[in-house]
Amino acid sequence: MISTLAEEDPPLVLIVDDDEEVRTAIGELMLSVGIEAVCYGSTRELIESPVLDRAGCLVLDVRMPGSSGLDLQQHLATAGIAKPIVFLTGHGDIPMTVQAMKAGAVDFLTKPVRDQTLLDAVTAGLERDIAERASAEVVQQHVERFATLTPRESQVMREVSMGRLNKQIAYDLGITEITVKLHRSNVMKKMQASSVGELIRAWEKLPQELRETAAA
């Protein structure tokens, strides 16, 4: 089930439920299929946890004393923590479900829930987190490589990614076509792109604010 997960950093399921029996049962279910889990009795305990940034997903009860699971979902989103969430509730209703799913929840399950249904939802959450983390790592690599470009090379990368020909780029930037070719070669090396297609994909993955700096 979790063969695609990185062995050096196994995922962690964070279970938050004010009912000790429920969270213990869920924790044991996760462990029974080889998934590491940690349980918390409140959202405050989770927020103070040092493992919140670790790869994995959350299993949250919706209604708890103090801050609810939906409150925690909003808090994490505001903090920029994109952690996949599986909601569990004994009091679910349609408005809650809609709110949770619109905010990016993996699933919204009503207690009592079948073990396999919960495991399927958790697996989907783990796979989503792995994919999102891998994508973020690729973007970070592109950002770091882009930072090594000179302002002129950044401009050339932008123009190439827009499908402009060397002679068009030379005219727009007021430089010779040979100079454009030199900049283009440097850009390809620094961005570690083996083709124009790869360069364009790298450009498209850059944050919008970085691409705007190349247009200045």
Image (tube, helix red, strand yellow):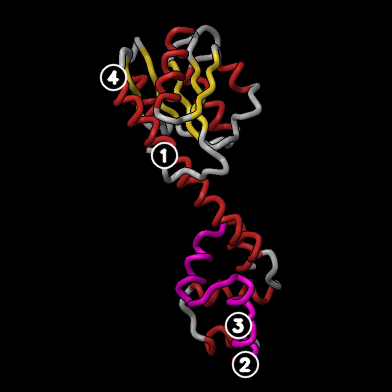
Q: Classify mark 3: residues with Cα within 10 Å, few (<14), some (14-19) or many (20+).
A: few
Check if residue 203 falls in the magenta segment. Answer: yes
Q: Amino acid at mark 4?
A: Arg
Q: In the image, residue 131 lies at what x, y percent?
A: 45, 47
Q: Main secondary structure of the magenta part?
A: helix
Residue at mark 2 to residue at mark 1: CA–CA distance: 52 Å
Residue at mark 2 to residue at mark 4: CA–CA distance: 67 Å
Q: Label 4: which residue?
A: 114
Q: Classify mark 4: residues with Cα within 10 Å, few (<14), some (14-19) or many (20+).
A: few
Residue at mark 4 to residue at mark 3: CA–CA distance: 57 Å
2 vs 1, front mark: 1
Of label 2 and label 3, which has the lower sequence position?
Answer: 2
Judged from the image, the secondary structure of the residue bearing numbered disc 2 is helix
Judged from the image, the secondary structure of the residue bearing numbered disc 1 is loop
Q: Which residues are magenta?
A: 177-206
Q: Label 1: which residue?
A: 2
Of label 1 and label 3, which has the lower sequence position?
Answer: 1
Of label 2 and label 4, which has the lower sequence position?
Answer: 4
Q: Nearer the viewer, residue 183 or 37?
A: 37
Residue at mark 2 to residue at mark 3: CA–CA distance: 11 Å
2 vs 4, front mark: 4
Q: Nearer the viewer, residue 10 or 45?
A: 10
Q: Residue at x 44, y 11 (%)?
A: 63
Relative horizontal placement of residue 120, taking residue 213 as reference (left or right): left
Q: Residue at x 50, y 28 (%)?
A: 36
Q: Amino acid at mark 2?
A: Ile
The reply to whether dot 1 and dot 3 touch (C-beta < 8 Å) is no
Q: Label 2: which residue?
A: 178
The quadrant of the image that shows the C terminus is bottom right
Q: Label 3: which residue?
A: 185
